[in-house]
Image (cartoon, rainbow, N blue to C red):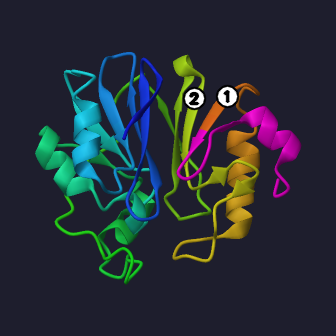
């Protein structure tokens, strides 16, 4: 079931690995569904609460647990646009992108759309967990949707395809820890945190 964080953000854990799927509205009124990794019916139910004029899917990266619900979510909501960073498109499309027997490869994935031309958020490329890993920074909400780059007092794993520990730590230090200290970080798994809390308490950075 979706949980309301604010008037503009809902979250719900989806799929077997309980990926945090977020629904967030930008200043423009567009609804962004971030990482629909499963449970498309629940995502669609939450999305309809927003009554948004347009809806788009944003992917923080291409690992299968974050993308498995894309096609069904698109069909239920009439969505036509999915964004993923170009460096993760090979991973996104790979039939080897699976966690069998738990999460099989995603099927019938759409071609990704170009990055949206919008002032709603900034795309921050944060390679390390995967080559094309991204965070989405909604400055007006003081919010960063971080995918699996950083977690509360931890960081993303780098033993999966495209992982690079040095790149991950560099991304976090140079692109996340430099954001305002009170920025709220919503990760791909687990509870939210802030830049200040991670700067003071994360043993990996």
Residue at image location 21% in from the left, 48% down from the top: 73
Nearer to me, 195 or 139: 195
- Whole-percent x and y of residue 65? 41, 64
Q: Disc 1 on helix, strand or loop?
A: loop
Q: At x 59% / y 71%, what residue is drawn?
A: 163
Q: Which residue is mark 1?
A: 183
Q: Report crowding for label 2: few under 14, some 14 to 19, many 20 or more residues within 10 A (C-alpha).
A: some
Which region of the structure is painted magenta?
A: 186-205
In percent of the image, x 68 and y 42: which residue is there?
A: 175
Q: State the separation of the CA atoms marked 2 and 1.
A: 6 Å
Q: In the figure, residue 42 lies in which quadrant? A: top left
Residue under pointer 2: 143
Query: Is 159 inside the magenta-drawn segment?
Result: no
Compared to residue 120, the image places residue 79 above or below, namely below
Q: Are marks 2 and 1 in contact (CB under 8 Å)?
A: yes
The quarter of the picture where residue 79 lies is top left
Q: Nearer the viewer, residue 10 or 85?
A: 10
Q: Is residue 112 in view?
A: no
Residue 35 in view in this figure: yes
- Relative placement, left or right, of 87 versus 109 is right
Q: Is residue 42 left or right of residue 19?
A: left
């Amino acid at each position: 079931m979706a949980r309301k964080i604010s008037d503009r953000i809902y979250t719900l854990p989806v799929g077997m690995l309980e990926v945090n799927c977020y629904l967030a509205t930008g200043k423009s009124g567009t609804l962004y569904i971030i990482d629909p990794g499963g449970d498309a019916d629940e995502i669609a139910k939450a999305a309809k609460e927003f009554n948004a004029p347009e809806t788009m899917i944003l992917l923080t990266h291409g690992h299968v647990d974050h993308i498995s619900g894309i096609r069904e979510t698109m069909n239920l909501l009439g969505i036509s646009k999915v964004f993923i960073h170009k460096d993760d498109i090979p991973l996104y499309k790979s039939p080897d992108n699976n966690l069998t027997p738990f999460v099989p490869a995603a099927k019938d994935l759409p071609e990704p759309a170009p990055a949206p031309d919008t002032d709603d958020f900034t795309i921050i490329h944060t390679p390390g967990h995967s080559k094309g890993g991204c965070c989405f920074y909604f400055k007006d909400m003081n919010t960063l949707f971080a995918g699996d780059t950083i977690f509360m007092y931890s960081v993303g794993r780098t033993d999966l395809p495209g992982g690079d520990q040095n790149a991950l730590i560099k991304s976090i230090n140079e692109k996340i820890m430099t954001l305002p200290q009170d920025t709220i970080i919503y990760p791909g798994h687990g509870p939210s945190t802030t830049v200040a809390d991670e700067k003071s308490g994360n043993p990996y950075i």
